[in-house]
Image: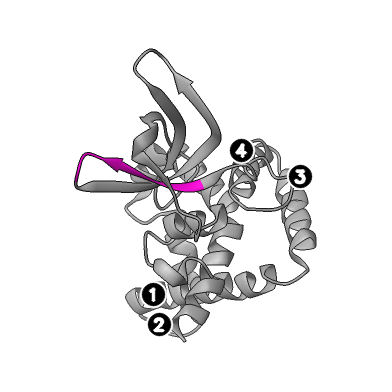
Amino acid sequence: MIRRILTPFATGLLFLAPVLLTLILLNWLAGYLVAALGPATPLGQLLGKAGMFFTPSPFAAFWAGIGMAALLVWVIGLAVQTRFRPQLEGGLDGLISRIPGLGALYRPLAQFVRMMGTSPGGEMSGMSVVSVSFGDHVEALALLTSPRLHDFGQGPRYLILIPTAPVPVGGGMLFVEASRVKPVPSMGVDDLAKLYVTMGTLTGPEAAK
């Protein structure tokens, strides 16, 4: 039951990630202006105003707004899981790309997030999920960029990409000793993206759904 609820939410969150990342970048660029206006962010004020339809309390209204936003993301996730995903992506991209200034930020972010998917012919379709060991007690899930081995004089190395959580558009590219890289055949690239976006709340069988 919990998996059926969380999976559409994670799918919707991943679908909306380019929009959210664009807003985060804009919020970062306007950080000094927001700080001068007060501690409440524009997005927080918007959620609070939406919650006012249910309660006059500012505190309760904010959390009501959060609940409404989470419900909207969940519904979008259900829609994205249907055959209408290409139409939804095209409509969203076309709408935001027409906004002056916003489209320039949104387009590269959208392209990167879509690359995290497993659509046929996608730029990341040749990548695979691997487990990388760092020392004897630490492992990390990462993406193997290609099966090609690199040797800079210290033995064969794989080039891997370790995304960041909860926004997997950044990360680090590392050359790792081949013996420390193990494939994870039960997990796809899209599953790894869900795992990072949800900060590990979808793990094991849930992440593979």
* Dominant secondary-structure state across the stretch colored magenta: strand
Q: Which residue is mark 1?
A: 63
Question: Where does the magenta region start and end?
Answer: 129-136
Which of the numbered marks, if any, corresponds to residue 105?
4
Q: Position of residue 11 (x, y in %)?
A: 57, 65
Numbered disc 3: secondary structure: loop
Q: Which residue is mark 2?
A: 56
Q: Earlier in the sequence, mark 1 or mark 3?
A: 1
Residue 127 seen: yes
Q: Is residue 17 above or below residue 107?
A: below
Q: Mark 3 against mark 2, which lies toward the viewer?
A: 3
**Distance between the alpha carbons at the discs numbered 3 and 4:** 12 Å
**Distance between the alpha carbons at the discs numbered 2 and 1:** 12 Å
Task: Residue at the far top: name it.
Answer: 153
Numbered disc 2: secondary structure: loop
Q: Position of residue 32 (x, y in %)?
A: 37, 37
Q: Nearer the viewer, residue 29 or 45?
A: 29
**Distance between the alpha carbons at the discs numbered 1 and 4:** 29 Å
The amino acid marked with disc number 1 is Trp
